[in-house]
Amino acid sequence: MGLPLQVLPLPVQRYSCHGCGDCCRDFTVQLSPEDLARLERQGWRERLGEPVTVEFQGQAFLRQRDDGACIFLMDNGLCRVHSEFGFDEKPLACRVFPFSLAPGPRAAMAGINFACQSVRQSRGAALPSHMESLRDFQGALPEARRASVIRLSGKLVADEGEVDALIAAIDGWLTRLEEPFEVRLDGLAWIAQQLMAAKLDTVRGRRFEELLDLLVGALPDELLHLPIEAPSRRQMSLLRQAVFARTEDPKIPEISRRGRLRTVLSQLWRSRRFSRGKGVIPPIGLAWPRGGRLERVAALPGAARGPDAEAIEELMTRWLRATILGGRAWGSGFYGWPMTEGLGALIVNLASLGWLARAHAVAEGAPAVRLADVSAALGRIDRSAGRARWLGGSAERLRLEYFARHDGLRRLTRELWFASPASSAPPT
């Protein structure tokens, strides 16, 4: 018997593949031994006269062209393997996307990735209609059939009631639509900070549920007594470093062509440019618009202050809820992190997304952030969440701890989403 499978319980979210081919561009696809055997049987090397896979650090990947596109992407945006052999003959990672399977203690949750534009636009069929395919995917992934613990904080293992209580509390707050969007995001960041600071080893079970009731029940009134200052220069510098970590995606052909030393030096140069916040915006992805200056990003209004504020609110609320409800905020869906740290990391992602949306608007010469800018930024941020190994490492934890200790989660959320054009931030 395998672990039961649950589909994302979010009726407002829909999805069907529309053949745009975006997931076949600028994505690095790791291959399993079964994938390699399948590609070998299909005879691609003999038919194309060149290898279709590449090895890097002991792992096999689908080969990419110089423009970042998969070797199998055709001019019409469709997959050649799919076209000639059928959907079931594609590599497993290609078949599963944009879904993700996160096993918990009692079920595996099928979440969904907003790197897909059809997901961001919520176009297509209701998610339960994909259940048969999701069960097939789970059957092909041994790790998705085994129960996995979820930690509450530190090494404390959460029980089922505590997991359910946190999900219900956060989702309930996000859907309290009588509160302005600004208040809901500020409250979410405040809850994350309070939980990260709390000593939960003696606050378990029913007492943890009471703590959540107390925190959410204090909103929004508590926020009125806790005015938010502008982020410090140090906080903004660390936030830009977080953006770099979430958008950096070195390509295997580029590393092979340039060499590892030159690749590392290039990464250091771009990381320092992000940290300083001055000069031309470094390249962000192959399809990202080029141009604009980092100083201009800081001068733009918050991402939710533009002409598409209502549509942006809907998209961001749906993404936040899908991340929480779909098991992608903690546990096996997010580097094995505890719930408290995972919630804090989600706020860092939110702030990074706000900065990146501004950067996209600047690169395209827009005077304010539009829905298209937020959508593009979300596509970059969510594609790396739970997937880029370095985002689950010690550097990311230290950055998150610094933000949480100095009211940084609230400060950054407000600055990047709701502030008027920035002037000069106070010193650290």
Image: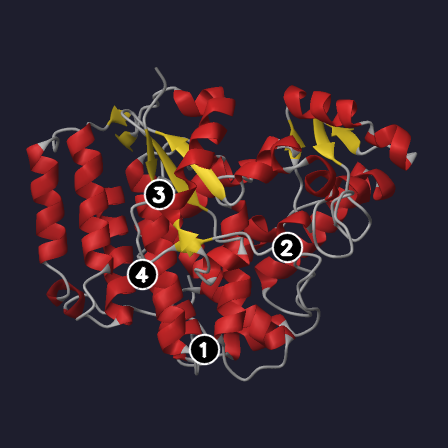
Pointer 1 residue: 422
Q: Does 387 sit above or below residue 121?
A: above
Q: CA distance from mark 4 to mark 3?
A: 24 Å
Three-letter residue code for mark 2: Asp
The answer to whether marks 4 and 2 mark residues whose Cβ atoms lie closer than 8 Å is no
Distance between the alpha carbons at the discs numbered 4 and 1: 16 Å
Task: Name which of mark 4 and mark 1 comes first in the sequence.
Answer: 4
- Residue type beneath disc 1: Ala
Q: Amino acid at mark 3?
A: Gly
Label tally = 4
- Residue identified by numbered label 4: 410
271 relative to 304, above or below = above
Q: Residue furthest right?
A: 49
* Crowd rating for badge 3 (residues with CA inside 10 Å; few <14, some 14–19, many 20+): many
Quadrant position of the C terminus in the picture: bottom left
Residue 191 picture location, percent across and down:
23, 52
Q: Mark 4 or mark 2: which comes first in sequence? A: 2
Seen at 88% across and 33% down, the residue is 47
Q: Which percent across, then down, holds residue 50? A: 89, 34
Q: Which residue has dot 3 on it?
A: 326
In the picture, which quadrant includes the N terminus?
Answer: top left
- Is 24 or 167 nearer to us in this picture? 24
* Pointer 3 or 2: first along the chain: 2
The answer to the question of whether label 4 and label 1 lie on touching residues, with beta carbons closer than 8 A, is: no
Applied colour scheme = secondary structure
Q: Nearer the viewer, mark 3 or mark 1?
A: 3
Residue with the mark numbered 2 = 22
